[in-house]
Amino acid sequence: MKVGTDGVLLGAWTPIDNQPFSVLDIGAGTGILALMLAQRCSAEHSSLKGEPAQQIDAIEIDEEAFEQCVENFENSPWSDRLYCYHAGLDEFMEEPEDEYDLIISNPPFYSEDYKTESEQRDLARFQDALPFEDLVEAASMLLSESGIFAVIVPYKEEAKLIGLAKECNLFPFKITRVKGTPTTEIKRSLLAFSFAEKTNFPIDELIIETARHQYTEDYIALTKDFYLKM
């Protein structure tokens, strides 16, 4: 599976102000989010005091993606703190590990009825493989008291996800809405939740390109640490 813009956005945007000791990536794919969080939280790439993210777990149900994830973890500079479970979320929840200070997920969200000819890609990209309801409930059960749950969803699903999170006592404290270009509609919503309810919190907008491969200053500033050429 190719590295997509959604994953890069979420991995770069996710708040780590709480200096998470333990991180969980739900639906890891090939491990991009876990690796990005390891990089951001390492002393070499972070202005945070100390070195958080000493425990970074990931779960992935697809066998081929799981094998690629394990290989990527092993070949990274942070192999001593990265671990991937070959399991679905429901199986993982039967015997959960300790609480997590940060839970991150780029969930499947194509809720339309059609399917492609690739069962593997369907599994990764369609909501019935990991319903939002299950994702939010699991996050609320696995998060530590001061934990953060960060996710990216289609903008049209933003209100639904906020409603589901509220039912589990999770409340947004940061939202960024993403547009491909200045003239296109809002495509994605980056959402960060915690157990602390806030009435006033930042909601901003990020534009990726002004023209084809002409990236905005905001997008470059957010993601430049993760591209070889930017």
Image: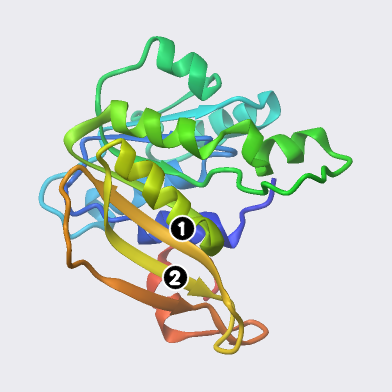
Q: Quadrant of the N terminus?
A: top right
Colour mapping used in the image: rainbow
Q: Are marks 2 and 1 in contact (CB under 8 Å)?
A: yes
Q: CA distance from mark 2 to mark 1?
A: 10 Å
Is 126 situated above or below 69? below
Q: Residue at x 51, y 47 (%)?
A: 106
Q: Residues within 10 Å of mark 2 (few under 14, many from 20)?
A: many
For numbered disc 1, what is the local secondary structure? helix
First in sequence: mark 2 vs mark 1: 1
Is 110 displayed left or right of 161 in the figure? Answer: right
* Furthest residue toward right: 117
Report the amino acid beneath label 2.
Answer: Arg
Q: Which residue is mark 1?
A: 158
Residue 80 visible within the image? yes
Q: Position of residue 219 (x, y in %)?
A: 45, 76
Is 174 displayed left or right of 217 in the figure? Answer: left
Q: Residue at x 24, y 25 (%)?
A: 99
Residue 227 visible within the image? no
Q: Position of residue 50 (x, y in %)?
A: 12, 46
Q: Which residue is mark 2?
A: 177
Q: Residue at x 67, y 84 (%)?
A: 212
Is 107 situated above or below 141? below
Q: Residues within 10 Å of mark 1 (few under 14, many from 20)?
A: some
Is 159 displayed left or right of 30 in the figure? Answer: left
